[in-house]
Image (cartoon, grey):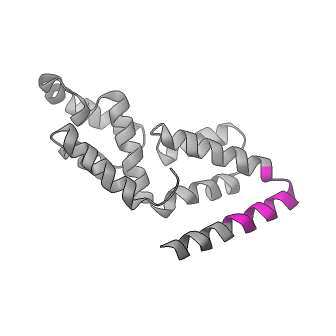
C-alpha cells in the first residue's frame, strides 16, 4: 500500500544522504540508471550484475541497486523475460505457427542462457496467443508497484 511506498521512499532518502556524505552518490545514481535501463530492455538480474561489474561499480552498490528489482522480484523477472521474448519473437511472439513449433526448444535455451528463470519461461511458453501473453504481462505489471 501507500505506507509501504513512503517507508521505501524514506529508506531511499536515508541511503542517498549517506551516499552523498561518503562520495558514492554518483556511482549509486549511475548504477540505478543502468539497472532501470537494462531491466527495461529485458536483461536478467545476472546480466545486469555482470554489466555493472564491468563498469567498475562496487558490489555493495550493485546489490543495493538490485534490491529495487527484488522487491517484486517474481513480477520483475517475468516482465524482463516477456520483454526478452518479445524482442526475439520467442513463443507466443512468433506469429508463424511452424516456426513457433520448430523453434520452441531453441527459444527456451536462448532465454535460459540470457539468465531468465525456467518458471518465467514456462509461463511465457504456455501462452497460446498474443492476448494471453499481454494478459500475463498486465498481471505482472500491476503486481509490481515499482517504477520499472
Report x, y in % for residue 19: 80, 59
Horizontal relation, residue 29 to residue 18: left or right: left
Residue 27 vertical position relative to residue 75 in the rendered view, above or below: above
- Residue 5: x and y in percent read 56, 69
Task: Determine whether 139 is above or below 26 in the image.
Answer: below
> Residue at position x 50%, y 63% from top?
71
State which quadrant residue 143 falls in: bottom left
- Residue at point 62% right, 41% down? 34
Q: Residue at x 18, y 28 (%)?
A: 100
**Magenta residues, dominant SS class:** helix
Q: How many marks?
A: 0
Left or right relative to 143: residue 126: left
Q: Residue at x 51, y 46 (%)?
A: 46
Can residue 137 be seen here? The reply is yes
140, 48: nearer the viewer: 140
Q: Residue furthest front?
A: 2
- Residue 118 at least partly seen: no
Does 7 appear in magenta? no
- Res. 144 image quadrant: bottom left
Which is more toward the observer, 134 or 128?
134
In the image, the segment drawn in magenta is 12-25
Q: Position of residue 98 (x, y in %)?
A: 12, 23
Q: Seen from this angle, which residue lies furthest bottom?
A: 3
Amino acid at each position: 500500500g501507500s505506507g509501504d511506498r513512503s517507508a521505501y521512499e524514506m529508506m531511499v532518502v536515508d541511503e542517498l544522504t549517506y551516499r552523498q556524505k561518503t562520495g558514492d552518490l554518483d556511482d549509486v545514481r549511475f548504477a540505478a540508471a543502468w539497472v532501470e535501463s537494462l531491466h527495461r530492455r529485458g536483461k536478467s538480474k545476472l546480466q545486469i550484475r555482470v554489466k555493472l561489474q564491468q563498469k567498475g561499480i562496487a558490489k555493495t552498490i550493485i546489490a543495493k541497486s538490485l534490491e529495487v528489482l527484488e522487491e517484486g522480484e517474481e513480477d520483475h523477472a517475468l516482465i524482463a523475460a516477456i520483454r526478452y521474448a518479445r524482442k526475439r519473437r520467442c513463443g507466443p511472439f512468433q506469429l508463424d505457427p511452424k516456426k513457433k513449433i520448430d523453434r520452441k526448444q531453441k527459444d527456451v535455451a536462448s532465454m535460459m542462457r540470457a539468465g531468465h528463470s525456467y518458471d518465467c519461461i514456462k509461463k511465457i511458453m504456455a501462452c497460446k496467443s498474443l492476448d494471453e501473453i499481454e494478459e500475463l504481462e498486465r498481471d505482472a505489471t500491476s503486481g509490481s508497484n515499482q517504477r520499472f
